[in-house]
Image (cartoon, rainbow, N blue to C red):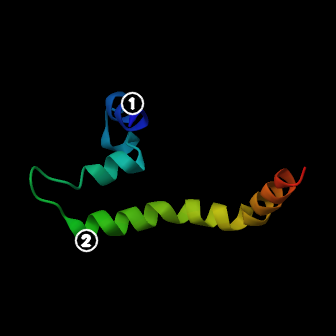
């Protein structure tokens, strides 16, 4: 929550906004544009999923080594 508020206060123009601030701007007063919200959320999560899939073997081996003592 603090990161969201910090990014919301510090950025002044729409070109400087973070992805989460941009996604939150799709929600109008009491109307939600669900298709746009969900599609942008999936697109924003793709880099994290790719990073996890790339580092998965290192994460698993680290957990396995840490469990044996």
> Residue 34 location in percent, x, y?
22, 67
> Residue 61 location in percent, x, y?
83, 61
Q: Which residue is mark 2?
A: 35
From the viewer's perspective, tell me whether residue 36 is left or right of residue 2.
left
**Along the line of sight, the residue nearer the viewer: 34 or 66:** 66
Label 1: state its secondary structure: helix
From the viewer's perspective, tell me whether residue 17 is left or right of residue 65.
left
- For residue 50, which numbered disc appears in the image? none
Q: Residue at x 65, y 62 (%)?
A: 52
From the viewer's perspective, tell me whether residue 22 is left or right of residue 49.
left
**Along the line of sight, the residue nearer the viewer: 66 or 9:** 66
Characterize the local packing of mark 1: few (<14), some (14-19) or many (20 or more) Cα atoms within 10 angstroms: few
Q: Estimate the spatial distance between the alpha carbons at disc 1 and disc 2, rounded to whole Å.
A: 27 Å
Q: Given contact means CB atoms under 8 Å apart, are the residues at marks 1 and 2 in contact?
A: no
Q: Residue at x 35, y 33 (%)?
A: 5
Q: Quadrant of residue 39?
A: bottom left
> Residue 1 location in percent, x, y?
38, 37
Q: Residue at x 10, y 49 (%)?
A: 29
> Residue 44 location in percent, x, y?
45, 60
Characterize the local packing of mark 2: few (<14), some (14-19) or many (20 or more) Cα atoms within 10 angstroms: few
Q: Quadrant of residue 8?
A: top left
Q: Which residue is mark 1?
A: 6
């Amino acid at each position: 929550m603090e990161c969201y508020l910090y990014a919301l206060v510090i950025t002044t123009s729409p070109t400087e906004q973070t992805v989460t601030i941009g996604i939150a701007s799709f929600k109008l007063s009491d109307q939600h544009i669900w298709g746009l919200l969900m599609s942008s959320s999936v697109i924003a999560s793709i880099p994290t999923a790719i990073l996890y899939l790339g580092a998965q073997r290192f994460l698993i081996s680290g957990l396995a080594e840490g469990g044996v003592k």
